[in-house]
Image (cartoon, rainbow, N blue to C red):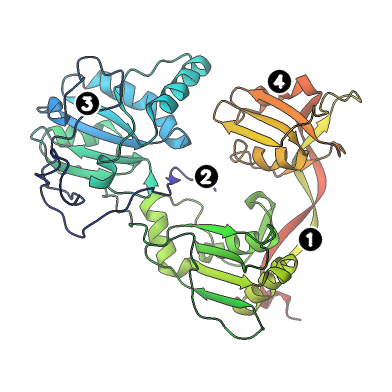
Amino acid sequence: MKRFFCFLALLYFFFGAGAQENTDIKAGAGMVVPLKIGDKVPPVALSGLINGAGLSGKDLSAFKGKLLVLDFWATWCGPCVSMMPKMDSLQAVYAGKVQFLPVAYQHKTAVETFLAKLEKQKGRKEQLPVLTGDTLLVRLFPHSVLPHLVWIGAEGTVKAITDQDALVGTVIERLLAGKDPGVRMKKDEAMTYDQGSRLFSASDGSEPGVSFAISGYKEGAGRGFYNDTMIPGNGADRRITARNNTLPELYRLAYAKQKKETVLELADTSVVSAEKLHGDSFLDWLKQGHAYCMELVLPDSARANAYNILRKRLDSYFRAYSASLEKRHVKCLALVRTSAADKLKSAGGKPAVVQDAFGAKFENCYLRVFMSRMQLPLQFNPLPLVDETGYTGKADIELSGDLSNLSELNSELAKYDLRFEEKPANLEMLVIRDAAALKP
């Protein structure tokens, strides 16, 4: 599903449940208390600036008298990057009245490298000042979902905290006029769950050495999954943990399938899927009985059977539904070879993958690794990916450019006599049905 936000695994601990003016921040002393709407923002130093001419050595008070918009972002967040041109345009329209300030937790060097690549690819240089290496503002305005916008009034108080939907002229006009922004405020949960620990402690006791637990939505657990059953554990327990996933997501985890390889044959898909919701609306939907936390723990000796065990446990819990793999004749995006010449053969060395928004480099990798990594840039192409090359050896592949653009991707793949083609194929699909539909 196309989501206009990114989930961020925060690297910081947030202290305090209330909100107040942090008068001791400037000196770097005391507890950092998250701010709420109406609170005064302390004079946080502007450090690690890019495009910061005239701002060196200053703090946020340098923007007093303007509507200041803090844009928390990351180089890996596609929706954040796509917002940049819009912010540049709005900055020009409201010059002298509004100041946009992108804020990144990433180091200055990493952000500069990213912006240089962005300029080369898009032909557009970032004009806004960018704050990098942030460790304080993210604690004053904790969040788990990007993009994250904080609107600070001319007098230095927090006026609104929103997602990217509020980035429109009407909201700016209302805030400049001293009015309520007229949009929904963004409310992120603080991440309290330690992803390195078990989500549940109790065992169901139905199978020796195996623990399975499932519940509804868990506050503070975030969204995501953990799976170490593919890694030998030297006797340690193996674990598959899913946090606040939907029913289709749980089954995709159990069957190792992508969303594009899933078919919902249900009388009412709205009970398990919310295609048109995003941001806080999607999170609200999850909390209304549409999300599950699940954990399977089993001994290392049983890890090879982990997926089968998980499927049976899910089937036992979700009795109203039936999930199975079926061959379907569907249109796919197939990776094919355009010649018999072997331009893929690896030169050897340690297997490695480097991938970002501007390309990817695969060293000594099987094509299954390449296909797996292509799921991300091609996530908005509706067709499932399939490898029809028949190539079984390890490959070296280096691609540059916008890999989400199929034409641009194929131009790069041509160096290796490869291309993605739309074609029908018999593909094993995950089919989820109403169990009642299967009864005679």
At label 1, the amino acid type is Glu
Q: Which residue is mark 1?
A: 326
Which residue sits at x=15%, y=54%? 19
Q: CA distance from mark 2 to mark 3?
A: 30 Å
- Residue sitting at x 43%, y 61%: 194
Q: Quickly name the residue at label 4.
A: 411
CA gap, disc 1 to disc 2? 25 Å
Q: Report helix, strand or loop for mark 1.
A: strand
Q: Amino acid at mark 4?
A: Ser
| Res 65 → quadrant | top left
Q: Reading the chain from its start, which is encountered first: label 4 or label 2?
A: 2
Q: Are marks 3 and 1 in contact (CB under 8 Å)?
A: no
Sequence-earlier tag: 3 or 1: 3
Q: CA distance from mark 3 to mark 1?
A: 54 Å
Q: Earlier in the sequence, mark 2 or mark 3?
A: 2
Image spot of residue 273 (x, y percent): 53, 59
**Neighbour class for label 3 at 10 Å: few (<14), some, many (≥20)?**
many
Query: The residue tagged with tag 3: helix, strand or loop?
Result: strand
- The residue beneath circle 3 is 99
Q: Whole-Å distance between the Cαs marked 4 and 1?
A: 34 Å
For residue 383, side relative to residue 215 (left or right): right
Residue at 37% in and 65% down? 219
| In this rendering, position of residue 13 left or right of residue 346 | left
Between the C-alphas of marks 4 and 3, the distance is 40 Å
Q: Position of residue 196 (x, y in %)?
A: 49, 60
Q: Which mark is residue 2?
A: 2
